[in-house]
Image (cartoon, helix red, strand yellow):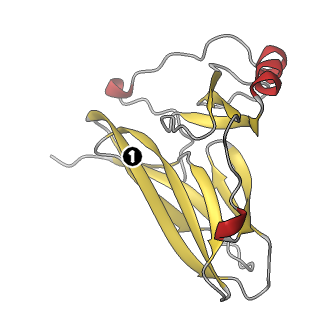
């Protein structure tokens, strides 16, 4: 019996760093998959632009082996144009990831992030949670706001977040991520 695997846009936290004193950039995606048999991958988009754009892709089999699984995917790319950001598309939309030196990494002390629950609605956000910015959440969430001070995040939640997210069950084969054709 063969198992069907869906290719979907996933969700992660992204960072990009210059590799020493070169034109190389390392793009890193980190997150938590809800199923141990899912895989995460950064895939280059077909547009011919410099530096290349990326999709955060999950490969999701029909059956979910429920166990939270941490992932870290990395790609190294050449940035001869001197661009200051990398564009990544995922279930939460387009992310412009700034390229920084390791010494410029922002400290996340006393910062928080508001996450919404996938699937992302047309307007607003549903199923919002507020977590410290250095925490990981499962990949069924997307970053809606932050990192920012806790009070700013709470104000955002009051004005932008609707009620609870719609409930879905991974066991029945439903997946919250947009399918890639």
Please provide percent x and percent y for residue 118: 58, 30
| For residue 66, side relative to residue 138 (left or right) | left
Q: Which residue is mark 1?
A: 70
Report the front residue among 11 and 181: 11
Q: Decide: is 126 above or below 42.
A: above
Report the front residue among 5 and 96: 96
Residue at 29% from the left image edge and 42% from the top image edge: 36
Quadrant of residue 52 within the rendered picture: bottom right
| For residue 101, side relative to residue 8 (left or right) | right
Which residue is farthest left?
Answer: 1
Q: Secondary structure at mark 1?
A: strand
Quadrant of residue 85 within the rendered picture: bottom right
Which residue is farthest top?
Answer: 163
Residue at 69% from the left image edge and 71% from the top image edge: 101
Please provide percent x and percent y for residue 147: 73, 39
Report the front residue among 45 and 72: 72
Q: Decide: is 150 above or below 80.
A: above
């Amino acid at each position: 019996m063969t198992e069907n695997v869906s290719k979907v846009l996933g969700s992660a936290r992204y960072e990009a760093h210059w590799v020493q004193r070169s034109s190389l950039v390392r793009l890193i995606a980190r997150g938590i998959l809800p199923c141990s048999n899912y895989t995460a991958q950064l895939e280059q988009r077909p547009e011919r632009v410099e530096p290349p754009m990326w999709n955060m892709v999950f490969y999701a089999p029909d059956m979910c082996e429920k166990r939270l699984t941490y992932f870290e995917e990395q790609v190294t790319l050449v940035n001869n144009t001197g661009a200051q950001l990398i564009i990544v598309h995922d279930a939460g939309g387009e992310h412009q990831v700034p390229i920084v030196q390791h010494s410029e990494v922002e400290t996340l002390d006393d910062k928080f992030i508001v996450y919404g629950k996938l699937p992302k609605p047309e307007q607003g956000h549903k199923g919002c949670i507020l977590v410290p910015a250095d925490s990981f959440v499962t990949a069924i969430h997307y970053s809606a706001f932050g990192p920012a001070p806790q009070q700013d995040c709470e104000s955002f939640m009051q004005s932008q977040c609707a009620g609870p997210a719609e409930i879905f069950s991974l066991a029945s084969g439903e997946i919250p991520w947009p399918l890639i054709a």
